[in-house]
Amino acid sequence: MLIEKKISELTVGHYVVKIINQADNFSLTAAGHIKSQAVIKHLKSKNVHCVLIDDSKTIAASNEKTESTHIKPSPLNREQLEQAKEIFNQSKSIQKKLFSDALSGSSLNLSPVIEVTNKSIDAIFNCPDALACMLNIREKDEYLLEHSVAVSVYITLFGRYLGLERDIIEQLSIGAFLHDIGKIKIPDEILNKPGKLTDDEFTIMKTHANHSIDIIKATPGISAPSLEV
């Protein structure tokens, strides 16, 4: 059952579907469970007032001590989160360079993509929650960069869940990392339009998939599974 909840009513274990009332421009990358009070605090700090939860997916919180006990995260957890943040920011920097190269007509350099996706895969295999939590909230003005990074992370999580071999996961993750590169060919006034696209604008927007295929095909060292993504 979908229920609206004020941020003050949100508790650990609730399954948040989406934000429905806020003062800023933040959005959830994906639905998911509230795993700690820190997440609720973060939402409050972003001026989120109300969310939609799926009560059927709510899980009972463990016998977690209240905030008054001031439990500090373990050094290992802090280290994992810092590593995840570093990978996330490095991924966005690489995305910026890829978009710049694609815009200028240069061939994409796959080496940094392979390097950062392997770091991401290692982090996810060691601690799936650490990197995924970095994607819970994203900046509106970096949507294009963060979306491709998020898709790469989620396809890695799903591949791990399915028990796929690491080599296959790596190739799928690389393909996901590059899948939206063709959007650089879409005019800014369409790509960044805040309102609904007209039929003509939507037709132009859909061409980004073909642009992506052309750019990725021309990338030295790209594999067939990566291209299929």
Image: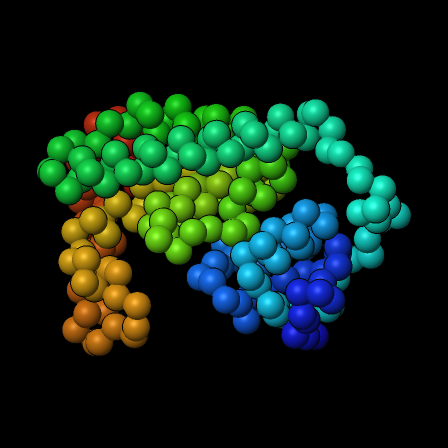
Q: Residue 140, relative to residue 171: is it above or below?
A: below
Residue 129 or 50: which is nearer the viewer? 50
Q: Which residue shows up at 80% across the image and 37% down it?
A: 71
> Which one is nearer the viewer's eye here, 194 or 105?
194
Q: Nearer the viewer, residue 198 or 193?
A: 193
Q: Residue 115 in the image: x percent, y percent?
A: 39, 23
Residue 64 falls left or right of residue 148: right
Rendered position, 18 above or below 34: below
Q: Residue at x 30, y 73 (%)?
A: 195
Q: Residue 2: x percent and y percent?
A: 66, 74
Horizontal side, residue 184 vs residue 167: left or right? left
Quadrant (top left/top right/bottom left/bottom right) for the C terminus: top left
Percent position of residue 68, x then y = 83, 46
Q: Say which quarter of the image contains residue 8.
A: bottom right
Res 156 seen here: yes
120 or 27, which lies in front?
Answer: 27
Q: Residue lying at the far left in this picture: please name it.
A: 105
Residue shown at 46% from the left, 26% from the top = 118
